[in-house]
Amino acid sequence: MHAVVLRYLDQVARAGSIRRAAEQLSVASSAVNRQILKLEAEIGVPIFERRGNGVRLTPAGEQLLRHTRNTLAEWRRTRLEIASISGDIRGEVRITAIPSLLVHVVPRAIEAIAALHPNISFRVIDADPAEHAEEMRAARPDIALIFIDKRYRHYDIAARLHSSLGAIMRADHPLAGAKHVTLTECAAFPVVMLNDAWQLDAASEAEFIHSGAQFAARITSNSLLVMKATMKAGLGIGFFTPTGFVDEIARGDLVHVPLADAGLAASEIGLFVHRVRGAAHHISVVADQLRREFNVLEETIRSIPHR
């Protein structure tokens, strides 16, 4: 296999030095240099430009490096597929999720998977809505649990979680008994806001032009834990789907009141799976478990008594 020389090439390109690459690979620098020279002789052009303080890729080297990294990635996937044939499913799965699904869905899925497949590891990213588009355009996650957006062409939607954006408040709040509320009604009370209230911005602006209302944000944060604690303390109304608050709502600590604006009230969270990488066994195992957790959460939300 030529994986060794490709690994050497990749590491030298990253380090910018044959000596530093050899140290990171735990091999002699002469061995790394010999393999690079042999490869240059084979393709007939220099791969690296030698300089006093290291090396730099030539245009031919940059082209070869793209091939190298694609080949190494495919080699890793192939090894994982071969291992999975014998039942040894392993590999890392990168998950991007909205904060509310990191409370229940993702941890429970990981717990279930770890019991059956201990060699699957996870890189879980808590991304703000503003970061979702960049994450998805760059196709970084293997799996994403975010609000539905059909522009993400590298992904298929494997499952949908139907929910509703609403006002979440303590059970003794004056609006807690309402069947639905407007943003203007909520603006008469202190609110707690996420740093990036992307769903509310346009809707509140349009409504407040006519009503003259304005949100008075007592607390602004990017932390769901902070938001939850402040709402339980009665410090303000928050605007979320019930997905991250099912336990508190079921206990009666908090109440979820749907918003009157139909465009805001109806929302869907998607289970996005990378169209190519999703075929790998370790990623498909995780996607299947997350799909089951979606179903459980949706049933739980339906079972919560509403006022």
Image (cartoon, rainbow, N blue to C red):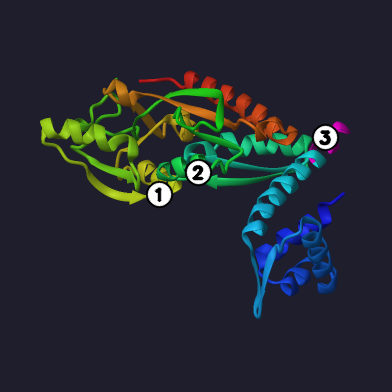
Q: Quadrant of residue 273?
A: top right
**What residue does disc 2 label?**
135
State the CA–CA distance, disc 2 to disc 1.
18 Å
Circle 1 Cα neighbour tier, 10 Å, few/some/many (<14 / 14–19 / ≥20):
some
Give, as a single range, the part of the protein colored magenta.
80-89
Q: Which residue is mark 1?
A: 222
Along the horizontal axis of the image, is 262 left or right of 114? left
* Mark toward the viewer: 2 or 1: 2
Q: Is residue 264 visible?
A: yes
Q: Is residue 295 left or right of residue 170?
A: right
Q: Quadrant of residue 59?
A: bottom right
In the image, taking residue 66 as reference, residue 88 lies left or right, namely right
Task: Report x, y in % for residue 115.
Answer: 76, 37
Looking at the magenta stretch, what is its main secondary structure?
helix
Tell me the SS state at disc 1.
loop
Residue at horizontal 48 percent and vertical 19 percent from the top: 302
Q: Where is residue 260 drawn, in percent x and y?
A: 26, 22
Asked if one can make out residue 26 in the rendered structure from this viewpoint, the answer is: no
Would you place residue 89 above or below residue 59 in this image?
above
Q: Which residue is mark 3?
A: 84
User: Mark 3 is on which residue type?
Assistant: Ser
